[in-house]
Structures are given as C-alpha cells and as structure tokens.
Image: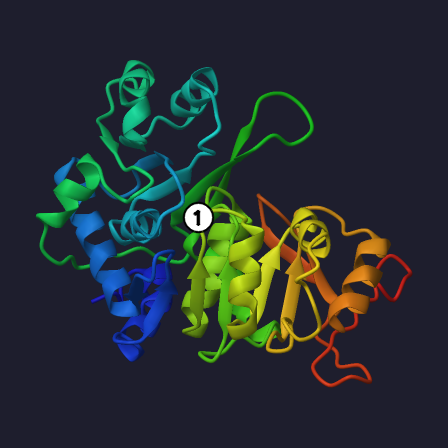
Amino acid sequence: MYDTNFLISRLGATCEERSDEPFAQLPGGRRVTFGDLFAGAERMASALVTSGVTPGDRVAVQVAKTIEAVELYLGTVMAGAVFLPLNPAYTTPEVAYFLGDATPALVVCDPARHSEIVEISREAPVLTLDANGQGTLRNLADDQPGFKAVARGPNDLAAILYTSGTTGRSKGAMLSHNNLASNSMVLRDYWRFTPDDILIHALPIFHTHGLFVATNVALLAGAQVVFLPQFDTDAILDAMPNATVLMGVPTFYTRLLADDRLTVERAANMRLFISGSAPLLVDTHKAWETRTTHRILERYGMTETNMNTSNPMTATAAPGRLVCPCRGSRYG
C-alpha cells in the first residue's frame, strides 16, 4: 500500500512487520500500536484530500504535541503533500509571515486560535486539532476510509521547516523524501536502534530533532516510544527504569541532574543518552557520568540538513558506555 511513496514506504515497513506491537505509550496508560498509527495516518491523508489538498501542496500545522499530530505528519506525506510544522508559541503576526511565504493549501491549528488563523490564512481552509487530539480535522478523519499512498520519489519535497539563519526573516528549508529517509536510516544504524529499544520522547515535534530524528528513527527501527507531551522531570525519571534511550537538549540533562532521584540504579537499564540542539558543557558531561556511570553522546545538525555528524558509539572500559571525544576533550 505504501510502495510508491519513498518516505512512507520506508517508515511503513515497520507497520506491516509489527502491526500489533506497541509503538507509543501515552500518559494515562493509552497504548498505540504501529498498526493504529498508520491506520490513523491513512485517515488523516484521506481527510486532507477531502479538504482539497493535492500532491505538492503545503499543509501548515500549529498544534500541540499529540500522537494525532504525528499521524497528521505521516498522513500529509502519505497524501503527497508537504508538511510545514510551526511552533505553537508563534504569535499571529509570525504565523502570518509563514503562511504568506509558504502559501499552504490547508492550515491546522488549535481550536482556541481558529478565528485569528482564519483571518490570516489567505483563504486556505483552516481545520483544528487540540491537545487531546480532538477537533474538526479529527472529526473529518474519523469518517474516512483507508488510503493508498500517493506516489512520491526520493527528490520530491516532504517537508518545509523555517529557520532564522543569520540574517533577515526566517527562511523555509526544503527537505526531500530522501533527505529524511536516508538521514534517519543512517542514525538508526549508527546509534544501534532495534525493536528492543524504548525511547523516552519528550522533545517537541515542530522541529527536526523531535520529529525527524526521534520519531523517524524509532519508526524505522520498530522501537517503542514513551510519548510525553513535553519535558517533565517526574515522567522521565518514572520511565527511565524501563526505557533504553533518551534524546534531549542540554537543559534536559541539567534539570535531571538537579533531582536526587537520578541515580545509577535508575539509569541501569538505559543504553544511550543523546544530546543536541546546543553544546553540552564539559561540567554537565562529567556530572552525568558521575551520577549515572553513562556518558552522553552529542550530535550536530541543522534545520536545513537534519543531522550532520555524531560522536561515536565506541565502547570504553565499562561495557555499553560511550566515549564522546569532541572539542579536544574526552567529554565532548
């Protein structure tokens, strides 16, 4: 069903192999299988097409982090359209600039912002999706049948992410199907992700780190995710004994270090801690290793390229631990 769509065919291979296996553990105990996720994505794709979206159209999305938002991302690509995620914190004038520049065929926003987004949508239809995964888009999607993925090749556009760069207004970085697929496949293999992994997913999904790195890598590997709406110290520490990987930014690690519940015992099941989006201080590296016996792996990327480089997964004297030799220091 997905063979003709370059990115979805790769992400969806896991769906067929592990359809009944859990993909996401959500707050409150809800579990979403790989089959559930892709069935939801198919309904989203059908809803988009019903709303007039055609291959190559932009779909602008400014919503809270939910599993339904992930289904919308997959459904947009499945429909042959281009996913344009926007930070929910952007103001109306900021969103107006992005909509004017990208000229989307459809906008999806939180119901609370519907009226103001309609005023700046340049006549594009506006649907809603709230923090509980409900709204006019979900209502429309629930009435839709399955969907056969639209044919898209490796060089077709899959997403646009706006980045400020160094001068002027934010610019839309265009990412192809092959950009996203190849980058995530390399990271899956380099970071040794397998179906046995459980990733603590506490990153936002409006930028490349949380959406195209964390989500795509987990899907490609057939790994589970503990899907948290945002960073939450209690939730991450509660998840850690049964998880294997955490992807975060430096503030994740400094905030966790400030909690006495972070111990060697709590981190014993973890095999990998990853940090990016900003440099991690040497002091943080040292403190983390002292508290957990693990070292943090840093990687570097940009909105325009996804990940460019990663510190190695080289074992040190302690089995399963990491060495991070960048910036002339063994602590990276």
Can residue 324 be seen at all in this image of the molecule?
no
* Amino acid type of the residue tagged 1 in the rendering: Pro
In-image side of 60 versus 93 (left or right): left
Residue in front for this viewpoint, 15 or 225: 225
* Residue that mark 1 sits on: 229
Above or below residue 152? Residue 113 is above
Percent from the top left, x then y, of residue 38?
Answer: 26, 62
Instruction: Inspect this view and state whether residue 1 appears.
Output: yes
Q: Quadrant of residue 332?
A: bottom right
Residue 96 sits above or below residue 284 on the image: above
**Residue at disc 1, secondary structure:** loop
Q: Kindly give the residue lying farthest to the right in the view shown.
A: 328
- Give left or right: position of 159 versus 32: right
48 or 87, which is in the foreground?
87
Image coordinates of residue 242 in percent, x first then y, are 51, 74
Q: Quadrant of residue 40?
A: bottom left
Q: Position of residue 122 (x, y in %)?
A: 29, 17
The total of numbered circles placed on residues is 1
- Foreground pick, 118 / 55: 118
The residue shown at (23%, 41%) is 134
**Residue occupying image coordinates x 13% and y 58%:** 146
